[in-house]
Image (tube, rainbow, N blue to C red):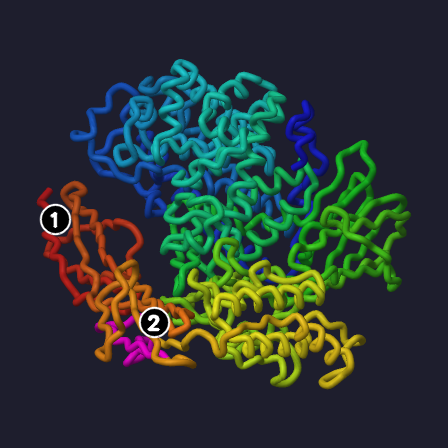
């Protein structure tokens, strides 16, 4: 965002607005799969199940309905709906499921979004009836709670007592309480969605009552106490409370709600962010990402630039520097160091809730700026993480979505997530794909329509008598046909996606090629339109090897907007040899072939799109492992045959050459090859002869050479470039190069990529002159002479470095990562009695080497199930046996163990 916009008094001014949900319909393509599966759940899931936790808390008849489960369950049988002052204390208060109510709020949002969208009128009416039933049920609960006189204000509405809020004011930690204002936000957001999308006046009344209750609690607290509350890890997580309170201001005209929204300000975050200081490392990602939309709204309503300044600067700290290829961010729910992507790949990456919120922020920032970078992020995240977060399966009772969408080697998406936070946001994600395909100018301004996503869809701008019909197989093709029904002056702004290579974006209008130039990421077509005008866009899909910003040896494969996942049972890094496929702009001229099962084949790799919704184990990131220095071209001439030597920092010749992802033209490529060759010869990693061989291969390659300027092998053009390069080739006074050194394993690892018994390695070396001195180092240990006996490695992920130095002092190193895990994980079981006839079971496994992959359990009436969260079992009249076992990521499985549950206590 331009600095002028950041500091201007009109910081809340918008340049674009989205179309109403009902006016845009996604009519085909990959997004309809997840949408239709989630709409099925919306239609069949009973409202009484969603209201059960609220009714139980208010002492109302639950009508025999069971709650959804997981985090959204009844809680402890002996728990009371304590008011703000009668909570008996942590040691005396049996509690459970302290986030209950949040999932119902998300479900209400999903129902409202679906009811307010396009489609069959009867189905929309059916969904609206469910919205009305749910809103009426919440109103009844709110009134019943008010009638008890137990709570501080009649607007209080929750599925537990008010005590969590008073304990938060006492700075109680996560564990005693669980983010009460987070749950409050989800309920209020669902009510406001019901009002906006279905016209429910009752929903607005209920939400406004909740807002007045919030004001009553927080306005009585000193600023220092509130600051301490919002800084608490998870316990102080408030979701988008500031956003819904700003929404209430707009919907009711009561500016008291603006002041209430400001009571959620975390001034430390606002101050460092507005100043552009990056202090995000270690902060809980979703706890703070969810507040940013509210800060934007506060900037609009107050005119204070610090709110918008903070959001824009935070965005720049997160995108792209902390953003994985699919659009997600965060490891183990926390943001990592600035610029760390490859360096922040653990085992619990990319909480889906964070991306849900980042999409909302990107959308809001686009409305205010019209900048293509926000639409580029939106396309990446919605196509890859969000669409890919919905399993390709129907369900009558589960959203079948991810919590994390991990990016580590050999990751698995763990589906289901009934009742979790990401299960809740996942309900909403898949019924609103149409919300950011198109944007339009505001009333009174010149007519403009932005086309931000190339998705098969229709859009109707009734007030301006404009209708667009887009036909495309995006993201499986890079072309789109848009039929424009409009009369008179209209500007159509077509986004040029960031993945389009080399300006290959062409536009025709009624078959006539247009002379267009992208300005700020958009091609603008302004003309006097006639109904039925056809705009055709061509942006060829290209396969790209995209390096991580902090480690160019770690790459993703991307086909147009789609990130590709390599299927593999391995849980260690997969190698990628792509030297002879790399083209000038970083694209790959690779032999990618499609299969009938929706996958692609690339050499030995089986690739699937992130949005497949499959159950396969996958690798999002691959490790470059080119053995020789080679370039794209025809025939063997572009393969120099020279080993792809590595510097002491581990970066190879080709890593250094392609570190920026590509080149502007052939000249830049040739100069970079020459520069890198000189560097590696000067380091003694290449001989002068090898350097000349690299230059000859580069001259004979086809990288960046226009076909019309290439006469083929032996042509004058190639000969002239080869001669010019060789005239500038490095020369040395010594012969040969640094010694060749290898690390050879006695055996291959298992299918997981891990050794399940100690690994034996041998180091060998060969010098051009004399006998080299050969040493080896494991991890950060000391250098030791490499003997004839094998090096034996025990458990751990080890970096083995071997170096050889010849009589001229030239040194070459090789590095090999070796993963060894010889022991299975061990599961610890804890149980908690839930009254006389129930028990909660928590299975917690530990594996300090490869990490726990899964814990499975089986009861008398249960198939083997994958563990996700603590689960409860009803006790019967006889003892029950629960079997369980953990498996680690290397493939070691714990022996099956048993837990015997006692009989239920007598009534």
Residue lying at 76% horizontally and 72% vertically, measured from the top left: 706
Q: Which mark is residue 635?
A: none
Let me know if residue 559 is in the magenta part.
Answer: no
Q: Is residue 598 above or below residue 41?
A: below
SS at circle 1: loop
Let me know if residue 753 is in the magenta part.
Answer: yes
> Which quarter shows the C terminus?
top left
Q: Is residue 863 visible?
A: no
Is 534 placed left or right of 127 in the picture?
right
Tag 1 residue = 904
* Coordinates of residue 465 in the picture (x, y in percent): 82, 44
Residue lying at 53% horizontally and 61% vertically, measured from the top left: 611
Tag 2 residue = 753
Q: Magenta stretch?
A: 743-765
Q: How many numbered callouts?
A: 2
Q: Is residue 656 above or below residue 68?
A: below
Is 847 placed left or right of 512 in the picture?
left
Q: Is residue 802 above or below residue 868?
A: below
């Amino acid at each position: 965002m331009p600095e002028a916009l950041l500091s201007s008094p009109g910081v809340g001014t918008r340049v674009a607005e989205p179309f109403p949900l009902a006016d845009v319909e996604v009519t085909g393509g990959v997004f309809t799969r997840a949408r239709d599966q989630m709409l099925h759940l919306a239609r069949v899931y009973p409202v009484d199940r969603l209201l059960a936790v609220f009714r139980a808390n208010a002492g109302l008849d639950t009508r025999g309905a069971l709650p959804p489960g997981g985090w959204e369950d009844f809680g402890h049988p002996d728990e009371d709906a304590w008011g703000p002052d009668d909570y008996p204390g942590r040691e005396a208060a049996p509690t459970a499921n302290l986030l209950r109510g949040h999932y119902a709020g998300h479900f209400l949002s999903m129902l409202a979004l679906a009811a307010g969208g396009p489609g069959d009128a009867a189905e929309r009416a059916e969904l609206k009836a469910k919205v009305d039933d749910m809103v009426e049920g919440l109103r009844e609960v709110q009134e019943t709670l008010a009638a008890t006189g137990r709570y501080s204000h009649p607007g209080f509405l929750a599925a537990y007592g008010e005590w969590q809020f008073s304990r938060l004011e006492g700075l109680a930690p996560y564990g005693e309480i669980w983010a009460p204002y987070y749950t409050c936000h989800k309920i209020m957001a669902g009510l406001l969605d019901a009002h906006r999308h279905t016209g429910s006046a009752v929903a607005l009344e209920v939400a406004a009552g909740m807002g007045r209750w919030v004001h009553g609690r927080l306005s009585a607290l000193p600023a220092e106490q509130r600051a301490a509350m919002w800084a608490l890890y998870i316990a102080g997580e408030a979701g988008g409370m500031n956003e819904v309170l700003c929404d209430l201001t707009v919907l009711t005209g009561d500016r008291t709600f603006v002041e209430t929204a400001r009571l959620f300000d975390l001034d430390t975050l606002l101050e460092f962010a507005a100043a552009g200081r990056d202090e995000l490392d270690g902060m809980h990602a979703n706890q703070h990402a969810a507040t940013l939309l509210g800060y934007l709204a506060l900037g609009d309503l107050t005119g204070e630039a610090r709110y918008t300044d903070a959001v824009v600067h935070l965005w720049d700290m997160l995108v792209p520097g902390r953003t994985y290829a699919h659009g997600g961010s965060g490891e183990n729910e926390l943001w990592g160091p600035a610029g760390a992507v490859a360096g922040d790949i653990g085992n619990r990456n990319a909480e889906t809730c964070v991306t849900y919120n980042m999409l909302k922020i990107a959308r809001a920032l686009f409305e205010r700026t019209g900048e293509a970078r926000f639409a580029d992020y939106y396309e990446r995240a919605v196509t890859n993480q969000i669409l890919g977060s919905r399993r390709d399966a129907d369900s009558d009772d589960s959203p079948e979505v991810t919590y994390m969408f991990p990016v580590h080697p050999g990751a698995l998406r763990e589906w289901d997530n009934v009742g979790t936070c990401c299960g809740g946001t996942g309900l909403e994600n898949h019924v609103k794909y149409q919300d950011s395909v198109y944007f339009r100018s505001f009333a009174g301004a010149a007519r403009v329509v932005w086309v931000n996503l190339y998705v098969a869809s229709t859009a109707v701008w009734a007030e301006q008598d404009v209708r667009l019909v887009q036909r495309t197989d995006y993201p499986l093709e890079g072309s789109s046909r848009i039929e424009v029904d409009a009369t008179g002056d209209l500007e159509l702004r077509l986004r040029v996606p960031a993945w389009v290579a080399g300006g290959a974006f062409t536009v025709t209008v009624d078959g006539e090629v247009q002379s267009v130039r992208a300005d700020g990421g958009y091609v603008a077509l302004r003309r006097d339109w006639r109904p039925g005008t056809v705009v055709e866009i061509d942006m060829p899909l290209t396969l790209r090897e995209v390096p991580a910003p902090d480690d160019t040896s770690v790459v993703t494969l991307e086909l147009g907007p789609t990130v590709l996942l390599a299927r593999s049972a391995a849980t260690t890094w997969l190698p990628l040899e792509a030297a002879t496929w790399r083209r000038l702009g970083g694209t790959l001229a690779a032999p990618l072939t499609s299969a009938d099962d929706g996958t692609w084949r690339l050499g030995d790799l089986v690739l699937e799109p992130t949005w497949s919704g499959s159950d396969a184990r996958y690798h999002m990131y691959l490790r470059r492992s080119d053995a020789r220095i080679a370039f794209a071209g025809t025939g063997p001439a572009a393969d120099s045959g020279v080993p792809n030597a590595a510097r002491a920092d581990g970066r190879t010749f080709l890593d250094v050459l392609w570190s920026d992802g590509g080149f502007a033209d052939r000249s830049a490529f040739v100069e970079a090859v020459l520069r890198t060759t000189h560097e590696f010869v000067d380091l003694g990693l290449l001989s002068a002869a090898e350097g000349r061989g690299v230059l000859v291969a580069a001259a004979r390659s086809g990288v960046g050479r226009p076909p019309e300027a290439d006469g083929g092998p032996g042509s004058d053009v190639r000969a002239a470039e080869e001669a010019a390069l060789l005239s500038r080739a490095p020369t040395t006074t010594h012969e040969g190069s640094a010694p060749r050194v290898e690390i050879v394993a006695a055996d291959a690892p298992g299918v997981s990529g891990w050794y399940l018994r100690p690994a034996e390695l041998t180091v060998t070396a060969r010098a051009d002159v004399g006998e080299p001195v050969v040493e080896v180092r494991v991890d950060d240990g000391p250098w030791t002479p490499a003997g004839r006996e094998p090096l034996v490695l025990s458990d751990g992920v080890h970096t083995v470095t071997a170096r050889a130095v010849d009589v001229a002092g030239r040194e070459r190193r090789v590095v090999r990562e070796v993963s060894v895990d010889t022991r299975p994980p061990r599961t610890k079981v804890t149980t908690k009695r839930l009254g006389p006839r129930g028990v909660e079971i928590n299975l917690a496994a530990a594996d300090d080497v490869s990490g726990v992959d899964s814990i499975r359990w089986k009861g008398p009436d249960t198939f083997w199930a994958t563990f996700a969260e603590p689960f409860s079992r009803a006790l019967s009249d006889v003892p029950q046996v629960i079997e369980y076992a953990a498996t680690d990521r290397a493939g070691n499985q714990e022996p099956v163990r048993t837990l015997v549950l006692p009989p239920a206590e007598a009534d």
